[in-house]
Image (cartoon, rainbow, N blue to C red):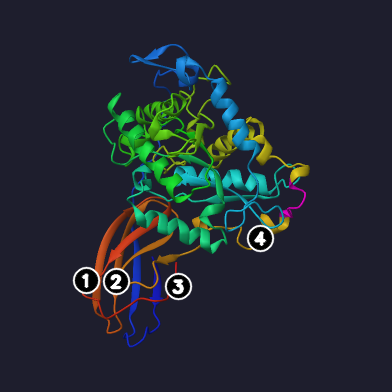
Amino acid sequence: MFKMYFSSKPVSTTPLFYITFCLLLTSSLHAQVDCDNTSTGFVPINDLGGGFFDGYEGGLYPDGSNTLPAQHKKAGKMLGSNIKPLNALGEVDMDSGKIVFAAFGASTAGNTFNVFKDMIYADPDNYNPCLRMQNLCLGGKGIEFMSADHNWYYLYLDSILDAHHIDPLQVQVAWIKGSSKEDSVPEFPLQPDSIYEKYIRAIQGLKGHFPNLKILYMSSHAYGGYAGEESNNWAIAGEPAAYYGGYAVKWVIRDQIQHSPEMAYKGLDIKAPWVCWGPYFWADGLNPRLSDGLTWQCDNYEIDGGGFHLSESGKEKEANMMLDFFANDISSKKWFRNGPTWATCVWGEKASNDPDYYDYYTDELVIYPVPNHGAFQVAYHSEQAATHSVEVYNLQGQKVYTQVYDVAEGSVVLPVEIPDVATAVLSGCCAHRNF
């Protein structure tokens, strides 16, 4: 059990308003992994190539190919070569600017990105000293929250960036791995088609909020067969859902390659960044992938992580695939690797020695917006999936709010709306945790 205390400062003649949050860990939500389910019999999309799954062509890209079409590849190379450090005004600044590389998704994406980030910051000689890795993943929040009409989502991301002295105008490159909790009926092609549609809206939302976002890399989930049907997220991260998710990503990228107006990354009505596959993580359990021998063992997953939260070995496996991809892809190697172009950047000021290096994702507790009139969000890190009970009290010790939430491991965002507090404005906060 831990408690969080928030107090406020008077605003004009506004009375002091004080609230106390008590978050009680009451139960674990994740079932243990099901190590018996070592294969689905599905063929990885990249191994499928020109073959078909349930009438739909394989291959990461159109026409059963795993290679970017020449025109799209050329565009990605040009965009990647033109990425330069930007200052808070979005202007090229080789002396004090940053190349911000952000990650989006839920905890499964955020956990891998943190390991990936640590690998880069631990090896400064090989990577761009202007590069700033920023984890913007929110535990338990699917891609359905990334559409432009979820203003609270982007307000929260801005609060993270602000805490790290980053402006949204500095975000130029991103990686996304996600799913949608609204799509919990694993039927093909209904589930991947619905996720595909949400990805379109999410990508448009990201581009609208981060106007200098030029390149977005997409990945789907790793093997989900170890998520037994008792797992709370089996229907969205188990099998066959994890396999289906690869088709959702494939179809989004296909649309842009085929010049869909909804995914336009150039011209007069730009709605999206340039997109392509990042690493494709899915392999059929213990059956080696033909393209590279990739397998997923049961011990690559946390024993009580529901079969979709990776263990340290699993996160390292994904992170190493990301490292290899970004160091060698034609659209990323120019801005990802170190080189003479980045000589004006001082690594220690941009990365591992930066006091802001450790981001919100693991360390902080945030309330926003501040000030407010009783409607706000509380964000913190949860060590495991659980049921959290939130109680809010005023200075007189009266309970003014209570709510029970099911939260996932990782970043948690809880909405709070306290009725009848028009005369009380929460205008500041301090926090204390007692575990």
Contact flag, marks 2 and 1 (Cβ < 8 Å): yes
Which label sits on residue 374? 2
Q: Mark 4 sits on what residue?
A: 354
In terms of secondary structure, where does tag 4 sit? Answer: loop
Secondary structure of the magenta portion, mostly? loop
**Residue 332, image x and y in percent?**
62, 36
Residue 74 location, quadrant? top right
Q: Closer to the camera: disc 3 or disc 4?
A: 4
Is 50 placed above or below 303 here? Answer: above
Q: Nearer the viewer, mark 3 or mark 2?
A: 2
Q: Residue furthest left?
A: 420
Looking at the image, can residue 381 be seen? no
What residue sits right under mark 1 in the picture?
419
Report how far apart the C-alphas of labels 3 and 2 lie in the structure: 17 Å
Give the CA separation, mark 3 to mark 4: 23 Å
For mark 2, does the 10 Å Cα neighbourhood hold few (<14), some (14 to 19), or many (20 or more) residues? some
Q: Nearer the viewer, mark 1 or mark 3?
A: 1
Looking at the image, is 247 positioned above or below residue 143? above
